[in-house]
Image (cartoon, grey):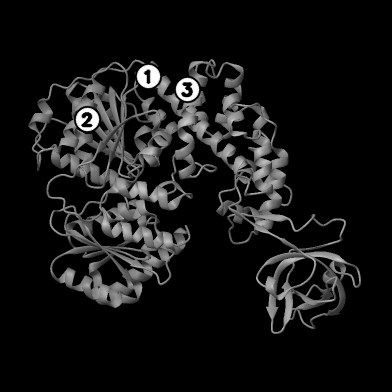
Amino acid sequence: MRPDILNPLFAEVTSLKGVGPGLAKPLERLALRRVVDVAFHLPTGWIDRLPRDELDMADVGQTIAITLTPVSYRMGGSPRSPSRVQAVDEKGNHVTLAFFGGASGWVKKLLPLNEPRRVSGKLEQYGQELQIVHPDYALPLDEAPEGGGRDAIYPMSEGITSKRIAALAAQAIERAPDLPEWIEPSLKAKHDWPDWKAALTAIHADPSDTKARARLAYDEVFANQLALLLVRGEARSKRGVPLAGDGRLRDSLKLPYAPTGAQSRTVGEIEGDMAQGQPMLRLLQGDVGSGKTLVALMALLIAVEAGAQGALLAPTEILARQHYETLSRQLSGLPVRVAILTGRDKGRVRESTLMGVASGEIDILIGTHAIFQEAVAYKRLGLVVVDEQHRFGVAQRMMLQAKAQRPPHLLVMTATPIPRTLTLAQYGEMDVSRLDEMPPGREPIETRVISEDRMDEVVDGLARHLSGGGQAYWVCPLVEESEKSDLAAAEARAATLAQRFGDRVALVHGRMKGPDKDAVMARFSRGDAGVLVATTVIEVGVDVPNATLIVIEHADRFGLAQLHQLRGRVGRGGGRSVCLLLRGGTLSETSRARLALMRESNDGFRIAEEDLRLRGSGELLGTRQSGEMVFRLATPDVIASLLPEANSDARLLVDRDGGLRGERGQAARTALYLFERDAAVGLLRSG
């Protein structure tokens, strides 16, 4: 149960004064649904209001704060024409204060003639005159902030201003309780960090306060490390079922190539783990095309050889069906029964699968999260493999593990290479294996960066590629995180290409129903469609060996890791593959550096390290993590620098300070709930 002291923070955002249905929509777009979300929506910068005694042309373009006296009005005759107030500074210099929207009565009330006011706004030049359009404030001198003041700038959404967010943040902070201290006292003193609430108050008042920002980031990293330690400790304390395979199924497997050294080493590590009485908790990191699926298959066969069942959990239906087809093909002729279960399977098919899993007749079940719903009962679940781990949170993994009488072994895989410095933040409770070699026949993908002004040449090149019997992906741009506009871009591009290539163009996107999506993918896999126009739905796992060209529009809008994932859709059938990154006309330095790195490197691990360096802040690995490992206050560079201390502090709490039972432990328990890492609390007998 969440401690009562936190309840004011976890109230709905609509409980804040002034938040009605109209404002709730833009707040929803910013994922600000509760008071705590507003409190943790930190400013990204600030405006310094320069205090001035007199107007000066040299300040044009700056935000100033100055004492002005209104001397005359020129009110607009219609709602469209502005209301203008002529005012003078203390030296008699003139400035026009302009207001649009026709509320002349309000303007006169705000700026009464001959009464000095402290006015702040951006000074602009209009012809030969100075003007301030819609001043940010015009206050009586006794109510104005001293000097100029500093205003925080917040990430915004259409329909809400930074100023409005600041006002809501002030309300949220007012509701924040004083919380007991969870940081080890000597560590807090070493960094001279403020208390938690003081830090939260300070960062909203002055976004340049580095100590306050570091304190809040540390709290989140600490809560994360503590949660992972508790999860790991609990998993290690449980008795699992040792599974020792005899090799008969693996020896019968007909492989297209000899496993790489990295694959053999990883399978050995997994085999060693599964033979133990303690459940395996292993993360398998492998770059795109490094052969993770083969490792997963070997692990599943070890379980089946030992008389247990295996489950393979995929994040999307497309990927689940692809795994099912791949494994069914590789296991044909072997006495291993494989089945698939997704949310779409209904009626008799579903009943038959559920009965087969419950009776033990089905050895390996592949599917989406449908495979750990209540209705699914396993006879002897021994191993769970989770693909694309970052799509699943700790709580979801625990639900799946609860399907066995004794905790099953767990192997989680990710094709998103993670910088070494961040592996501990994401997967601190796991042992890590890395596939750092490519199977034979995987040639590096030739990557070129082309201006979108040369679109006609790109389409001509696509025509030559298709006439030579090749297939291609065409990925449409990410548009401001909006599915609707992503979809519109994809539909428009598909229509344009269809004018030239007719029904050889297919379209797939995230809003399609499962069967429709599968039908399009099947058409492309068979070669009936030559070009697959797609939104980023194809980012993970789609495997069509004959597709050796990928075009990514507006590549400068994607994160490095996502570009690398998309590029990995080609180069799967041996031979030469090409990735064309189309860029916009104006590039930021970061975008330029990203695209240059993509051109020169195919190494996902190097790209991930570089992505962290270039990004510096923003979302981890360029994809919004939808599991529970979301960091809101700590940016990737800060996570890397704070991790060692946070990890040591969490260990100290668990090993020396009595875990969550002692005084500091009770405070830390509150931190776990505050930062929503409380899935770990439920594991503990001490509660």
Q: Is residue 353 above or below residue 456?
A: above
Mark 1 secondary-structure assignment? helix
Residue wearing tag 3: 651
Q: Quadrant of residue 107?
A: bottom right
Q: Quadrant of residue 229?
A: top left
| Res. 535 in view | no
Identity, as a three-letter code, of the amino acid under mark 2: Ala
Distance CA(mark 2)–CA(mark 1)? 20 Å
Residue wearing tag 2: 299
Distance CA(mark 3)–CA(mark 1)? 15 Å
Identity, as a three-letter code, of the amino acid under mark 3: Arg
Which residue is more in the foreground, 15 or 349? Answer: 15
Residue wearing tag 1: 236
N-terminal of the two: label 2 or label 1? Answer: 1
Q: Give the mark toward the camera: 3 or 1.
A: 3
Q: Quadrant of residue 234?
A: top left
